[in-house]
Amino acid sequence: MNDKEKTKEQLIQELAYLRLLIAEMQDKYRQSEDILRVITAQYQHITEAMSDYIFSVHIVDGNPVRTVHGPTCKTITGYSPEEFSINPWLWIQMVHEEDRAAVVKYVEEIVSVHSVKPLEHRIVHKDGTIRWVRNMPACQYDETGKLIAYDGLIQDITERKIAEEALRRSEEKYRIVAEFTYDWEYWLDSDGHYIYVSPSCERVTGYSPDLFSADPDLLTKITHPD
């Protein structure tokens, strides 16, 4: 039966059915949009909370030709993947000027040696703050063993570096106090080995700090039997 042979009532019923289908499809579409918004918000929350990001460098005939930065790069650097794409030199421009030579040499070693240890260096965040990062490369090869790309994992280690610097300054402060005090100071670890022996030990015992460090039992040996 074609549309011309259908009654008015049949056409009205089909039209109502089609409207019902459209309404159901629109409802499902709205539900899909709501789910997509939730997933997008969750992804953004996870992305903003991450302190690592991955970048990939493509190699042609031994030369880097293109770098793709992962979406979480903005969390660490302040720059979006699009900004890195627009400015292909941004990756080295954001490196602290005192560390740029080391980073350039590091990239050259990745391309030529194909096996290097992680590098820790400073970057200048888009907001002007200095951050420490750890760069860990992983090389990719074709079936002939030729380097075609390498991935890098960038970790934000700023808090660790701040803690290490605070500890270094604290140790330096106490070391200076110990080295200039008249009394003999020494620090032992849990195994009874000397961590530090102040110079005054030589005034008190006649033995240098190096001798005490080399022989953990020296103090016992020089103690009077009584």
Image (cartoon, grey):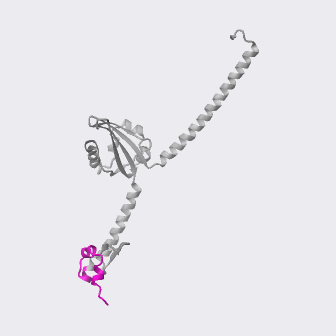
Magenta segment includes 212: yes
Looking at the picture, tell me which residue is in the foreground, 185 or 75.
Answer: 185
Residue 87 in the image: state x and y as whole percent: 35, 37
Q: Residue at x 64, y 28 (%)?
A: 25
Q: Which residue is drawn at 65% across and 25% down?
A: 22
Q: Quarter of the image holding residue 184?
A: bottom left
Q: Main secondary structure of the magenta part?
A: helix
56 up-or-down from 182: above or below: above
Front-lying residue, 219 or 208: 219
Magenta stretch bounds = 202-226
Q: In this view, does 25 lie to the left or right of 134?
A: right
Q: Residue furthest right?
A: 9
**Image x and y of residue 154, in percent:** 38, 47
In which quadrant will I find the C terminus?
A: bottom left
Q: Which residue is drawn at 72% across and 9% down?
A: 5
Establish if 160 lies above or below 151: below
